[in-house]
Amino acid sequence: MSTDTTDYAPVGILDDRDVLFTTLRTGELAATLTPIDWGLPTGGRWVIDAQSVPGLFSIAYDPATDTTARLIVNDAAKLPGAGTGVTVTVHYYDRYQIDGYGNPLPGKG
């Protein structure tokens, strides 16, 4: 019997919230993000690739201990009115897709 111990690249991200309330304040949690990854979820890097309202969100996490990341409302004044959608595209790089400084490696993500 053999056991596959390969750490494959992450294949996606799950979030715990699909509705964003206009009552959120700056610094409050918009969603918790969890990587879909075969290996250990610590030691990676979370990056916002794009957002429909620039500066609306930021990401908070401790790569040494966190297995999830927090999508934070960076500027509540930029929240759109009720019924209006916003988008954010986040990329998770696992520990094997970043260099020693935490920067994504070209062609690895």
Image (cartoon, grey):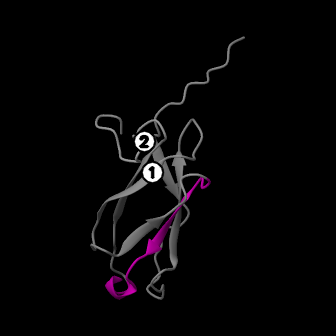
Q: Which mark is residue 45?
A: 1
Q: Which residues are magenta?
A: 65-82
In this orientation, which residue lies closer to the viewer: 12 or 69? 69
Q: Position of residue 100 (x, y in %)?
A: 42, 41
Quarter of the image where one finds residue 73: bottom left
In this orientation, which residue lies closer to the viewer: 36 or 19? 36
- For image coordinates 56% across by 35% down, the residue present is 38
CA–CA distance between discs 2 and 1? 12 Å
Secondary element type, mark 1: strand
Q: Earlier in the sequence, mark 2 or mark 1?
A: 1
Q: Is residue 80 visible?
A: no
Residue 4 magenta-highlighted: no
Side (left or right) of 41 relative to 50: right
Disc 1: CA contacts within 10 A as few (<14), some (14-19) or many (>=20): many
Q: Is residue 96 above or below residue 103?
A: above
Which residue is outermost to the front?
100
Residue 76 magenta-highlighted: yes
- For image coordinates 51% across by 79% down, the residue present is 28
The amino acid on which the numbered mark 1 sits, given as a three-letter code, is Arg
In this orientation, which residue lies closer to the viewer: 79 or 94? 94
The residue that label 2 is drawn on is: 100
Q: Is residue 44 visible?
A: yes
Which residue is outermost to the top?
1
